[in-house]
Image: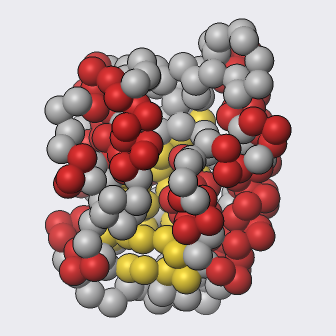
């Protein structure tokens, strides 16, 4: 009997690695078919070690880096959409939801993993991705009357939100307040970022695949100074993420994890 199909839908190439690479690798090892979907190509980012701005050259590199990272964790070749990096919150909602619906119907996942409503550290693209996916999941199970390109309906069994322990990502929130996305994160209460123990549906011990997760992060070299995964997130955050990963069930249902998705949960 084949394992479940898992789709991790994130805003940017590399978002999959920090939050979920360990759990996805464990799922793949247990027989799940794992896909990663990036809604953007990451063109609004910057090269970590060179002055040129992003744009199409960076987008091409980041898509290739995502392909390499997926190979490391045992996922299939990624799906990279072309929604606007840095502007997901302003993008047409109907168009964005339709794009995600098409992906879900094509991949037919049993389980969808995506950003939580706090965006991890208030990142507006992460928050927008959560909203798009949350709206797309029920629509994926409804027959499309007017557009055959949507494909046959598909019912997603479960949605899990990426999560971090409360307070862990506060340095990233403070960093964003000093950057280009300051306006998009100021409305976020930093005290509410992350989740407490009572909110967690799943805590996954990923220490047995920590080296693999670190290799996957390192695939996203364009975003790392000197190729070091610890340069992007400050204050020992990466070391913590090499130990555990956290997920919350959509709807706030707290309970035992689906063993088929997260065998080490």
Residue 78 locus on image (x, y percent): 65, 47
Quadrant that contains the N terminus: bottom right
30 up-or-down from 98: above or below: below
Which of the 4 image quarters holds residue 214? bottom right
- In this view of the protein, can residue 39 be seen by the observer? yes
Say which residue appears at 37% left-offset and 40% top-offset: 173
Residue 145 locus on image (x, y percent): 24, 38
Q: Is residue 134 left or right of residue 21?
A: left
Q: Is residue 56 left or right of residue 248?
A: right
| Observer-nearest of 148 and 131 | 131
Q: Is residue 236 left or right of residue 160?
A: right
Toward the front, the furthest residue is: 235
| Observer-nearest of 109 and 51 | 51
Say which residue appears at 67% left-offset and 51% top-offset: 230
Say which residue appears at 33% left-offset and 90% top-offset: 256
Residue 210 locus on image (x, y percent): 70, 72
13 up-or-down from 146: above or below: below
| Observer-nearest of 74 and 243 | 243
- In this view of the protein, can residue 35 be seen by the observer? no
Say which residue appears at 70% left-offset and 64% top-offset: 213
110 up-or-down from 126: above or below: below
């Amino acid at each position: 009997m084949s394992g479940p199909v898992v789709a991790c839908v994130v805003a940017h190439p590399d978002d999959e690695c920090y939050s979920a690479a360990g759990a996805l690798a464990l799922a793949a090892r247990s027989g799940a078919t794992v896909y990663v979907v990036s809604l953007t190509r990451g063109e609004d980012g910057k090269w970590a070690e060179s002055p040129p701005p992003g744009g199409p050259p960076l987008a091409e590199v980041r898509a290739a880096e995502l392909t390499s990272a997926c190979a490391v964790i045992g996922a299939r070749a990624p799906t990279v959409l072309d929604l606007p990096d840095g502007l997901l919150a302003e993008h047409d909602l109907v168009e964005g939801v339709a794009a995600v619906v098409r992906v879900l119907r094509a991949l037919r996942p049993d389980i969808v993993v995506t950003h939580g409503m706090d965006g991890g550290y208030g990142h507006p693209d992460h928050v927008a991705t959560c909203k798009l996916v949350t709206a797309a999941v029920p629509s994926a199970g409804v027959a499309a009357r007017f557009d055959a390109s949507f494909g046959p309906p598909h019912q997603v069994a479960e949605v899990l939100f990426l999560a971090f322990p409360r307070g862990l990502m506060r340095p990233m929130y403070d960093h964003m307040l000093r950057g280009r996305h300051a306006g998009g994160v100021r409305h976020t209460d930093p005290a509410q970022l992350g989740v407490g123990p009572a909110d967690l549906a799943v805590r996954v011990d990923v220490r047995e695949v920590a080296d693999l997760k670190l290799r996957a992060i390192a695939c996203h070299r364009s975003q790392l100074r000197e190729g070091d995964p610890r340069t992007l997130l400050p204050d020992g955050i990466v070391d913590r993420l090499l130990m555990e990963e956290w997920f919350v069930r959509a709807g706030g249902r707290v309970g035992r994890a689906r063993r088929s998705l997260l065998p080490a949960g």
